[in-house]
Image: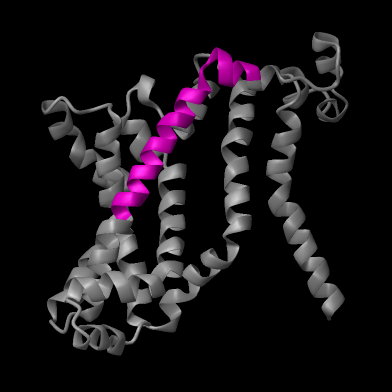
Amino acid sequence: MTVISMALVALWLIIAAFPFLWTLWGSFKVQGDFFSKADWMNALHGVHTIRETGGAFTLDGYHGAWIQEEFWKNVVNTTIVVFFTVVISLTIGTLGGYALARSVHRYAFWILMAALVFRAMPHITLVSGYLLPFFEWNIWGILPTTIIVLVAINQPFTLWMLHSFFLNIPKDMDESAMVDGCTRFQAFRHVIIPVMWPGVITTGLFSFLLAYNDFAVTSMLLSAENETMVPAISSFLGTTQVEGNVMFAVAAVVSATAPLFMLVLFFQRHLVSGLTAGAVKG
């Protein structure tokens, strides 16, 4: 039974990892090899790559994406958007989640229910409502506008997750701190937050992934010069009418995906605890 389980896990890992590994391999080839219709083995042997570049591997895709198309600017834009989205979401979510977890009033439940409804709505539905005022106020296409929308979309999730973590912290800790002379905020800052760091890190990771991988919001609200990585990769592909720089997109995909692999591997325990936090209590 153990052998079968290990075989199934190994098979799943191969299937799950194959798209990225194949894309990683293909990013060092030319388009004629990686997208060869005559023989898919060309992607392995690099027939056209050798003919065009003189070697079995080439960095032309990375050079074209990062230097020619200035993909590094999209990386900087993504870093700015992700950083402020995570910081603002965690700040509001931590304060709000603590208040809702400690509240004895019925409205706390309905606030969480309303947050759940907004969380369940497709992002494209929410974004469409922002477009008209953003155009009228002349704030469309810039990074701060996109950050505001991503925070609004992300906030219900952070509230629910942090609310679940706070419920697992006994109220006695707050009360003991206030008996010793702390105010409610001092008890929150000096007693609760140090205990809550694993929950804050977990929620921050999920907030990071939401902002990092977002396409609907960033593609609709950002101008071409302010694009983040995901819509920029899409623009490399071109359209059905216009041929794109496909190998630039392949190299950019690898560049954008590699940090996520490292992040998930490094913080895997926090991610797992975040996925199971709601099942413990709340």
Q: Nearer the viewer, residue 148 or 20?
A: 148
In the picture, measured across the screen, residue 153 lies left or right of residue 51, that is: left
Q: Does 206 appear in magenta?
A: no
Task: Note whether residue 158 is visible.
Answer: yes
Q: Quadrant of residue 268?
A: bottom right
Q: How is the image coloured?
A: one colour
List x then y, in percent, for residue 93: 28, 62
Q: Nearer the viewer, residue 161 or 17?
A: 161
* Position of residue 103 measured from the top left corner of the image (x, y, whole percent): 18, 80
Q: Is residue 264 above or below residue 216?
A: below
Outermost residue to the front: 181
Location of residue 272 (image quadrant): bottom right
Q: Is residue 231 left or right of residue 112?
A: right
Position of the C terminus by quadrant: bottom left
* Secondary structure mostly seen in the magenta stretch: helix
Residue 78 picture quarter: top left
What's the magenta region?
63-89
| Frontmost residue, 185 versus 198 | 185
Residue at x-position 32% and y-position 76%: 191
- Above-or-below relation of 170 to 53: below
* Residue found 31% across the figure and 45% down from its top: 150
Q: Please indicate whether residue 1 sits to the left or right of residue 178 in the image.
A: right
70, above or below 234, in the image: above
Q: Is 71 colored magenta in this rendering? A: yes
Q: Residue at x 36, y 35 (%)?
A: 218
Q: Is residue 227 left or right of residue 29?
A: left
In front of the other: 212 or 263 = 263
The picture places residue 57, in percent across and down from the top left corner, at 81, 22
Q: Is residue 245 visible?
A: no
Residue drawn at (13%, 82%), measured in percent from left and top?
105
- Name the image quarter holding the N terminus: bottom right
Give x and y (percent) for residue 192. Answer: 33, 75
